Amino acid sequence: MNNHSFPGKGELCQNPECVKWRKINKRNFEKYAQIAEKLFEAYLEQENPYHFFELTKHARKRTVERAINTFQLFGEVVANGYVVGYQPKGKVMIIKGFMKIGKGLYRSLHVPLKIEETDEGLLVRVLTVFDPSYSSHLFDEKLEQRICWCQPHDLDEL
């Protein structure tokens, strides 16, 4: 495998940039996971969290393109999701959740979002939304942690 090829199942990309970013993301997640999780819990526990839920223009575009129901996005994916990543530079957390698409069938989604404090409460701004299984070669086997940066991805736009 050369430095710019995709790893096989169970392998990690050896591209120096991918190795560097895996280390950075792991360190950031270990350092900031509890902070992100507490902030996310505080958002969900406030009265009427849905009233403090916004989609950016980019996120609205992606929900249409990717056939994601915005009511399900909050009610199923975000409300029942959990933190799988945190980028302290932009104060962006990544929520992984599942959207029901049929009897016993669920679609895994990642929802990068920002939580901002306002006078009225904690406001969530959804930055984008994507199904990590469509780019599974970029993620670990659980589709939670990004492991390869050799190809562009929606997160790179943030």
Image (cartoon, rainbow, N blue to C red):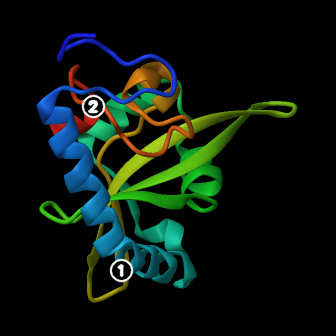
Residue 56 lies, with reference to residue 124, above or below; the image says: above
Q: CA distance from mark 1 to mark 2?
A: 24 Å
Give, as a three-letter code, the residue at label 2.
Answer: Asp
Residue type for callout 1: Ile
Where residue 61 is drawn, which disc sits there? none
Find residue 116 and report its horizontal and vertical position in percent. 26, 74
Residue shown at the point (38%, 71%) measured from the top left: 33
- Residue to which mark 1 is pinned: 35
Q: Residues within 10 Å of mark 2 (few under 14, many from 20)?
A: few
- Observer-nearest residue: 122 or 26? 26
Upstream in sequence: badge 1 or badge 2: 1
Where the C terminus falls, by quadrant?
Answer: top left
| Residue annotated with mark 2 | 154
Local crowd at mark 1 within 10 Å, few (<14), some, or many (≥20)?
Answer: few
Cβ–Cβ below 8 Å for labels 1 and 2? Answer: no
Image position, residue 57 (x, y; %): 25, 40
